[in-house]
Image (cartoon, rainbow, N blue to C red):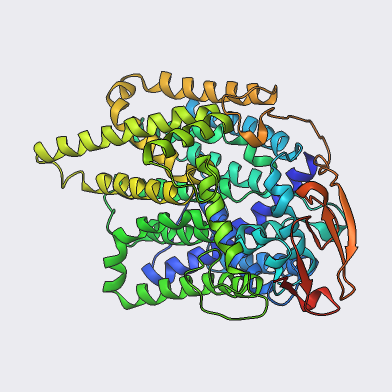
Amino acid sequence: MLVHFLVFIYMFITSYTIGRYCTTLLVRHLFRTDNHLHPALYSATGLGYIMVAAGFFSLFAPIGLLFNIILCLATVACYFLERRNGGRFSFDMYPGMAWKASIAFLLFSLLFVLIKSSGPVTNPDTGGYHLPFVKWTEQYPVIKGLASVHSRFGFNYQYLVLAAVYGFSFLNIPTLHATNGYIMLLLLWYVVTSMDFVRGKGLSWLDIVKLIMLFFVINMSNAMSSISPDFPASALSILVILLTLDKIQDGSFYKFDCLALLVFLLSIFAVLFKLSGLPVLLFCTVFAAAIFKKRSYLIVCLSIGMISLIPYLIRNYLISGYLIYPLYSLDLFDVPWKSPLEIVIAEKEVVKYYALGLPVGANVSFAEMIRSWLGYLRSSNPVYVYIVYLMGVCILLNIAMALYALFRKIFFERLPLILVNLFLIISLIYWFSLGPDPRFGNGYIIPFIAITLALCIQGIVKKMQPVFVYGALSVFLLLQVAMLKGAAISRSQNNKDNVVAFNLISPAPYAVPDTFSMYLKEGIKVYKTRNNTQCWDAPLPCTIEREVFKAQGEKIHDGFLPEH
């Protein structure tokens, strides 16, 4: 816990300072004004900037001590430059009981996150390829043909590059996994302290949305002990949607302003975290016309997009031979280290069919597919089935509310909110078509349910404002206490027992892999796991037993080739 707490402090100082300076610079250039945003938003954008910088750096060198020295120097430079420009590093405080209650809730949430994130990592995907990929990023510059060592390295989640920045393995300790916990804290901090009720303005409709979201977000706490990109991508998507709702509330939905810039930045970073975040770019279309009307807006946005994508695309090319993996239809290169087509197809299809509970390539009727899917959800996490039913009810409610607005001739008045829900429904269709496991779609599922329910109950809730808010925070505290005692409403397949362990100083050690060693004919020693289990913290190169590959030379830096 203590180690992760120190990492959280370091992450906040670096990401907040860099995020604040860079975002303020953009705002001053584009809008000729200063901005005063929530510190959690500065930190979230700062993590994105750092991730992109680390992506460029990883093309030439491992992410370790040198990058962190540069990061610290950049943080100091940004601090003094912002001070010179008149920026004040301060945090808003508000009088009243609601603000004090929110701070008390967040302090307990900090303890909750520290305990959960420091506990044992039980997510098998983290042991299988998340952690090994981070270790590759920490120990080597990007390696040609790395997807030949493990086909899932080809996904090249840029979030794992960010995790390498804060992994601190250069201190000769096992790679730390604090990033998911930190992002959970950012999300909780923003959602709770940005509520109008907490700031003494009375309960708004958006406050109700945020409180409903909190219930679902807290139940995702098992994600904090891993470095899976699923939760961080969902967290950024939720922030994008909340900022969009903020723009609706202040009447600037179609305007390209400071909040719109944040929507754009966080949308790009969510996509780089994981491609499941792609639909969140839909929320940028509402102010696209404003961007195209002014050349400076267009140039800046295109430049940000290109700079952010370049390291990701180059890394894709070097790791798998594809521009975007596993989009095998976008086949532009013919290089020796290119992943075999059949493996790329399998990686793309296995995610979808696994989430449906079907064998890959199964040809079944739609009704049979739905039955199989619901069966998978029950076995994976019984709560998922109820969430799916609730989604169906919310879709029907949205159709009814849209028809009501049309007949009452208030359709155009409510058009921004109707568009948001339409974008969310499109996002859910995208999620279902690629792999309908709720872990991959929480960034859309949670806001969609929260917005719909808030629209339905806002009249009742506003009549009992204090009771609803304090009651909700009390329920959330009880949920956290229950989870710390080993109970949980949501029990996922990867965390059925909701393991809790109090590790006061260092996080719990990783599981010990069952490996054996062998040599490639080029003389490189390779570790393989028996029975295709996880590599965890095994020495590199490590892979599962079924993977077959060869080296491009006598050194690991020369890269790897698929064994055809």
Residue at 75 percent of width and 47 percent of height? 6
- Left of 308 or right of it: where is 450? left
Q: Position of residue 313 (x, y in %)?
A: 56, 72
Q: Is residue 157 visible?
A: yes
Q: Nearer the viewer, residue 52 or 149?
A: 149
Q: Is residue 308 left or right of residue 54?
A: left
Taking 123 as reference, is 35 above or below it? below
Quadrant for the N terminus, please: top right
Q: Is residue 195 visible?
A: no
Query: Residue 509, located in which quarter of the rendered image?
Result: top right
| Residue 214 or residue 392, whichever sits in front | 392
Compare residues 3 and 356 and report the one nearer the observer: 356
Q: Position of residue 513 (x, y in %)?
A: 84, 47
* In the image, residue 548 above or below residue 445: below
Residue 443 point in image, percent of width and height: 47, 45
Q: Is residue 469 above or below residue 529?
A: above
Q: Quadrant of the C terminus?
A: bottom right
Measuring 41% from the left and 21% from the top, which residue is drawn there?
A: 468
Total marks placed: 0
* Residue at 81 percent of width and 44 percent of height: 510
Pinpoint residue 327: horizontal percent, then vertical percent. 50, 65
Quarter of the image for residue 112 reads top right
